[in-house]
Amino acid sequence: MNNDRRRRLLFATSAMLVAPFAAVAQQGSKLRRIGLLFIKSGDTSPYLKGFKDQLRALGYVEGASIQIDERFLVDDYDQIPRAIGGLVNESPDVIVTFGATATLAAYNATKRIPIVAVSTGDPVKLGVVASLKRPGGNVTGLASRSEELSGKRLELLRDVASDARRIAVVFYPGSASEVMAVQAYRSAAQVLKLDVLPVEIRSANEIGQQIAGIRKLDVRAIAFVGSSLFNANRKQLVSAVGELGLPAVYSGSDFAHAGGLMSYGPNVASRFRRAADYVDKILKGANPGDLPIEQQESIDLAINMKTARALGIKIPQSVLVRASLLIE
């Protein structure tokens, strides 16, 4: 073999060896885009901080290797259809949703772009996945066991307020997941021999009026369905409930931190951090339809002791020992 042929062969072999690594390097240097879709608030940052911190821990650099698009966060549910239309037109690599309404809207808008849901209620009943173990489409992420949570919240109200036999259940009626959760409250109430009265809130503008209207319902306590609308407006919600002087149980510890009496549910900030792990897997080539949907790994019971004292409620020891967090 002459020197020219040997050089050509060595060059070709080297090119074959280097090409895959060059392709990987080129892929790794590509700016990957993550679109967010849910109801925002002035206090959304704790959720996004955990999400961004986890992505950073996984090696991503915002503005260099990833771009997190917050332009399509909305103020209310009626803005979601327009927002998801604009987001899909941007063709991000992944869409991250929070709440069943946003997840269903994203699913109906695209079967092409992977969707990571931070919380969906029951995604099988919602119709966005085939099963929790094998979603089968473009949606994966984290789900909630609304039936179990509904019964536990009613039990807590019964334990801390023995005269609370008639309870208002507040929800957003435009969410299929929240409507199913209300049915779970009804079923649990029958077992516990309680009466529940559904109260609808359709937008942030209705919060004050609808909560104030509970005064006329002759109820002795209030339970809230997990809702991204309520999460985004938790300070306003808790303040309105405070005017009634009634015990209430909410869906997450952020409500107890905002002054609500009790909350029982998954930690939203930790769910956003876990969602970052799903985003990482998808950006590295995983098919969302092959990634099992996780149910909440832990449930927090938070009690605001200052609010309990203001309401004249003595929290039973049997409830205190179960609390993950006592807020003084």
Image: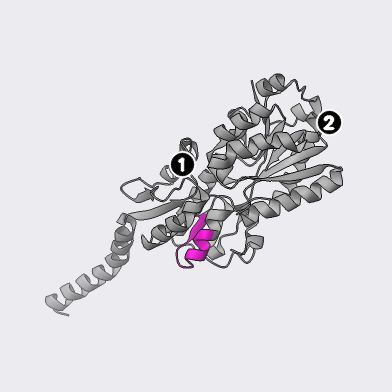
In depth, the one of 13 and 41 nearer the eye is 41
Magenta segment range?
105-116
User: Residue at the spot x=50%, y=52% of the render?
Assistant: 78
The residue that mark 2 highlights is 163
Labelled disc at residue 273: none
The spot of residue 272 in percent (x, y) is: 52, 45
What quarter of the picture does the N terminus occupy? bottom left
Residue 254: horizontal and vertical position, in percent?
A: 58, 34
- Disc 1 packing (10 Å; few <14; some 14–19; many ≥20): some
Please state the horizontal and vertical placement of residue 32, each as a whole percent of the image: 36, 55
Residue 324 occupies quadrant: top right
User: Does residue 283 sit above or below 271 in this rendering?
Assistant: below
- Disc assigned to residue 48: 1
**In the rendered image, is residue 197 in sight?**
yes
- Residue 161 in the magenta stretch? The answer is no
Q: CA distance from mark 1 to mark 2?
A: 40 Å
Residue type at mark 2 is Asp
Residue 9, relative to residue 231: is it above or below?
Answer: below
Look at the image and tell me whether residue 132 can be seen. no
Give the residue type at disc 1: Leu
Label 1 vs label 2, nearer the camera: 2
